[in-house]
Amino acid sequence: MNRLKKKAWKDLGIYLYSFIVGGVAFYYLIAHFDEIGVLTTFTARILMLSLAIVTGIWVAVGQFVMKRRVLRGLDEREKLIYENAKSISDAIFGGLSLAGFLGIFVWMSPKASIPVFVPVLMFFGFAFIAEIVKPLVILIQCKKEQASE
């Protein structure tokens, strides 16, 4: 149980660090959007398309690669706890995405122009929330099992 607990704390630290770095980067891009005239429109489109393709591939395939790496060295009980936490995390991401991406059009009206960074920020925000839930569920489950022993 200690290996799983250490991994959950490590994941929380990594997510906090990525939240800070990602938040600063998005803030910089949004605040200085007009000043970033170095990239031509074509170059910016190619860059954004490349980022979208890489992110899409990672979202689709990366989970299977990481699952094998994460579950290595865990016993059956730890694997079950991890799988349950992952399913809760996936359900939260799906629910937030459905509500958020459909709700944005209701909130801003279907004919309103939505800045391109709003759905991107929503996607990463929902993914961040869902990924934070996973180690929290693992830590809560480890605490419950520790108390019952």
Image (spheres, rainbow, N blue to C red):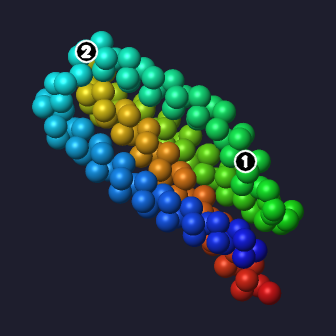
Q: Is residue 85 visible?
A: yes
Q: Is residue 145 left or right of residue 138?
A: right
Image spot of residue 138 (x, y percent): 66, 66
Quadrant, the N terminus = bottom right
Image spot of residue 72 (x, y percent): 79, 56
Image spot of residue 98 (x, y percent): 50, 35
Image spot of residue 137 (x, y percent): 62, 65
Quadrant, the C terminus = bottom right
Relative to 38, residue 141 above or below = below
Q: Which residue is mark 2?
A: 41
Find residue 67 and name its label: 1
Q: Quadrant of residue 40?
A: top left
Residue at 67% over, 57% down:
85
Residue at 56% over, 61% down:
11
Marks 1, 2: nearer the viewer: 2
Q: Is residue 141 visible?
A: no
- Which comes sooner in the sequence, label 1 or label 2? 2
Find residue 90 and name its label: none
Label 1: state its secondary structure.
helix
Q: Amino acid at mark 2?
A: Thr
Label 2: state its secondary structure.
helix
Q: Amino acid at mark 1?
A: Lys
